[in-house]
Amino acid sequence: MKVLLYAGSLNLVDKSGIGQAIRHQKKALEHLNIAYTTNHKETYDIVHINTIFPNSLFMSWQAKRKGKKIIYYAHSTMEDFRNSFIGSNIIAPLFKRWITYCYNKGDLIITPTEYAKSILDTYGLQPPIYSLSNGLDTQFFQRNNEASDRFRKKYHIAPNEKVVISVGHFMERKGIDDFIALAKQLPTYQFYWFGHTSMNLVPRKIKRAMKQKIPNLHFPGFINREELRDAYCGSDLFLFLTHEETEGIVLLEALAAKIPVLVRDIPIYQDWLKPNVHVYKAKQLESFKKQIIRIVENEVPDLTDQGYKLALEKDISTISSKLMDIYQLGER
């Protein structure tokens, strides 16, 4: 078996969760000693498509003509496309029709969670759908003091300062507007949002919020995975305010780094993340504010060991064997 990992227009998604997922897929295949390529001109038995750009659709047509098996990884839904970029809500129904057309070209579909599968099940897709986490390298994201020191030294953060971080694109869906509002209401804590989005794609509402002069709010931009690991290790809280996800790789990374986690109480995390057991949850801005204070001031129990156990369940070593099972189904 040889797998073609295809990510058409990778440069457009390389700094997103999809780019990270592709790197995880490579590690999973290496872990199983399965031959793979990213060059569509080489020979292959299965093409694993990660993007929904026109060149990816063309790749599926080409593979079909050659009699190859096609696996579409459904990273996107209409629901998590909304409230993202300028005009996303207007074109969301068209986006749904497009991804439905693309996904239907596969012999089978993989999506990261049962929650995402339950959404795709309503789309009338023809191929069978399997849920499989994007996975993560838990060993790489393990917490260590040296990483913490590097982060605090780089950003000139005093040892006694409390730091709240989040990671993602500059999207309303990601909750960046609430992150900004909380930074404004909690001036004694440092708030760092890591990630980058072209400001040409960012809605006016978010641009206006980001331009506020808030001394304790920082937007360092995109950082590599080593720097991101350091940020997890050197912070006091990972605040994940997203309104909609298909999984959330950065959340898995934060759990692996044993940083306290506070998430928005949304359906995708209802069954998987138990409140006050694995993570803390909140819904409204005021409840987020209260929870942040309790967590960073150590007024609530430390849940990081339980959260870490969940991250281990998503480790690449575990995910890789399940991916192999799906590939074998695809070959039939």
Image (spheres, rainbow, N blue to C red):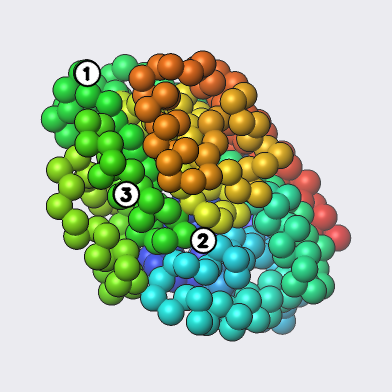
User: How far is disc 2 from disc 1 in space, using C-alphas?
Assistant: 46 Å
Type of amino acid under label 3: Ala
Q: Residue at x 77, y 68 (%)?
A: 122
Where in the figure is residue 147, as x and y percent of width and height?
A: 30, 24
* Cβ atoms under marks 2 and 3 closer than 8 Å: no
- What label does residue 38 carry, if any? 2
Viewer-side residue, 196 vs 38: 196
Res. 318 image quadrant: top right
| Rendered view: 56 above or below 283 | below
Q: Along the horizontal axis of the image, is 36 left or right of 271?
A: left
Res. 226 image quadrant: top left
In the rendered structure, which disc, 2 or 1, sits on the residue that comes first in sequence? 2
Res. 275 image quadrant: top right
User: How far is disc 1 from disc 3 in space, using C-alphas?
Assistant: 23 Å
- What label does residue 181 carry, if any? 3
Mark 3 lies on a secondary structure that is helix
In the rendered structure, which disc, 1 or 3, sits on the residue that comes first in sequence? 1
User: How far is disc 2 from disc 3 in space, using C-alphas?
Assistant: 42 Å
